[in-house]
Amino acid sequence: MSETTNPYADLTRIDYPLIEENTAMPPLTRDAIRNEARSGLEEIRDFVTTDVFVAKLGELYDLAPEDRDQFVRENLLDPAALAARGITVPAGLKIQRSVFGDGRPTIFCVTKLMSDGIRKVTYTFDSGSLPARV
């Protein structure tokens, strides 16, 4: 049996509060959560569908899947690299690395923290979701 390693094990989560396992969620009504989630997702959508961001995604998906991790680290997680391409991440949004317990091949995500400071909405981009373009 081969040992599986987590390539994201050395990453630490920044900018979001650390929440204990059994911490009660701050009170938000169902409508407030629905409205904030919808608004946050629309804000993320509006950012990730800009021409300059879509062009950067095209560069990412031009690469073979095994080369995409390094590209994300050097281009999408680096504010100077984004600025050099004319990409400005709107206030309140964050591009970050992410890993999920179900093993999906997420390469990065764009998140928006909700007003309670705990909940967030996320668009994920998976390495295998699009093959390299030819």
Image (cartoon, rainbow, N blue to C red):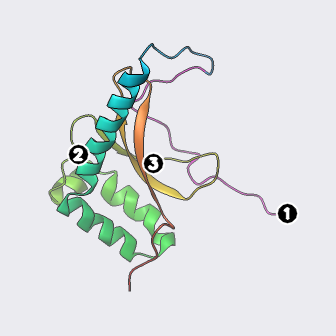
The residue tagged 3 is 97
Q: Percent from the top left, x then y, of residue 76?
A: 32, 55
Residue projecting furthest to the right = 1
Name the residue rendered at 43%, 22% in the picture. Answer: 30
Corner quadrant of residue 133: bottom left
Q: Percent from the top left, x then y, of residue 93?
A: 29, 39
Dot 3 crowding, Cα within 10 Å, few <14, some 14–19, many 20+: many
Name the residue rendered at 36%, 68% in the picture. Answer: 60
Query: Circles 3 and 1: CB distance less than 8 Å?
Result: no
The residue tagged 1 is 1
How far apart are the two marked residues, 3 and 1, measured between alpha carbons?
Answer: 28 Å
* Residue 121, magenta (yes or no): no
Dot 2 crowding, Cα within 10 Å, few <14, some 14–19, many 20+: some
Q: Is residue 98 visible?
A: yes
The residue tagged 2 is 89
Amino acid type for the residue under numbered disc 3: Arg
Name the residue rendered at 30%, 51% in the picture. Answer: 78
Mark 2 / mark 1, whichever is N-terminal: 1
